[in-house]
Image (cartoon, rainbow, N blue to C red):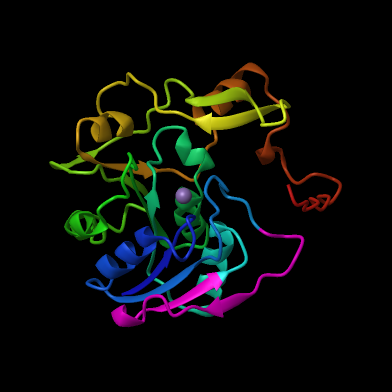
Amino acid sequence: MRILVANDDGIYSPGIAALARAATRFGEVRVVAPDVEQSAAGHSITAARPLTYKRTPVMEELGVEAYRVNGTPADCVALGMFQWERVDVVLSGINLGTNLGHGAWHSGTVAAARQAVLFGVRGIAFSTPVTGDEPDFEALEPHVTSVLDCLLPKDSLELLNVNIPRHPRGMRWTRLAIKHYDGKVVPAQDPMGRQHYWFTVVPIEETEGETDLWAVQYGYTSMTPLLIDVTAHEGLEALRRAAPLEEFDEGPPERPPEPVEEDES
Ligand code: MN
């Protein structure tokens, strides 16, 4: 099995070394990751300048080739899959900090896994909380292995968001905690007295059972299958019933379709 490992914390993060080490038990591993931290980059891509990469000898003792890219997590997966053919699965992380609920939208860690799915390959994102001290990645490694033992044989699961608490006492299948948005704008002043703002995501205190946030709060490893298709299918059907427009089965349109312009947004 060919396993591409990426992240959003950058190639020098201890989290990606831990994930690469765990992955070597399951197949041939290659690391392609951003040269600097790209946390909260979401699914952005670098379209206005070229991408380059450099071999980086950070995981030689694992026998793993590693490359750092001057781009985003999604760029790293695209470039990694282009340069290394027949990748079977992309693993992303282990992120320093959880990616729970709406955080999955902002997360470069989740985006790297999602990018794999866009290219037709499975993607699994891993994150762990940071509270004070750096996570003990050596202690987490058997739990990462358990997750991979569980998930890798299930090839119907394309995109998974996994959050591993500090001392896991089991694993749970969960859904995203999306009842409240946990993004907050926090005003402050710089040392010169000028107003500025931090936009940050802070943990929601209370949550419903069986969500990812709930699982991690109660010490379980949370495994959430995610969809690529964010179409509101029920809403679409309701709109088609309530406000019927020209339907596709009425035959081909008289004019040829206009090209859809690709922009960089
Ligand atoms: Mn990160």
Whether residue 214 appears in magenta in the rendering, the answer is no
**Range of residues picked out in magenta:** 46-68
Which of 16/226 is in front? 16
**Of the pair 24 and 249, the residue shown nearer to us:** 24
Q: Is residue 187 left or right of residue 206?
A: right
Is 186 located above or below residue 81 in the figure?
above
Report if residue 188 is visible in the image: yes
Image quadrant holding the N terminus, namely: bottom left
Q: Residue at coordinates 54% horizontally, 24% vertically from top-left?
A: 184
How far across and down, in percent of the image, does residue 48 sit? 77, 60
In the image, 166: left or right of 206?
Answer: left
Q: Residue at x 47, y 62 (%)?
A: 120
Asked if residue 159 can be seen in this view, the reply is no
Q: Is residue 117 above or below residue 67?
A: above
- Identify the residue shown where x is 39% and y is 51%: 95
Position above or below: 78 against 198: below
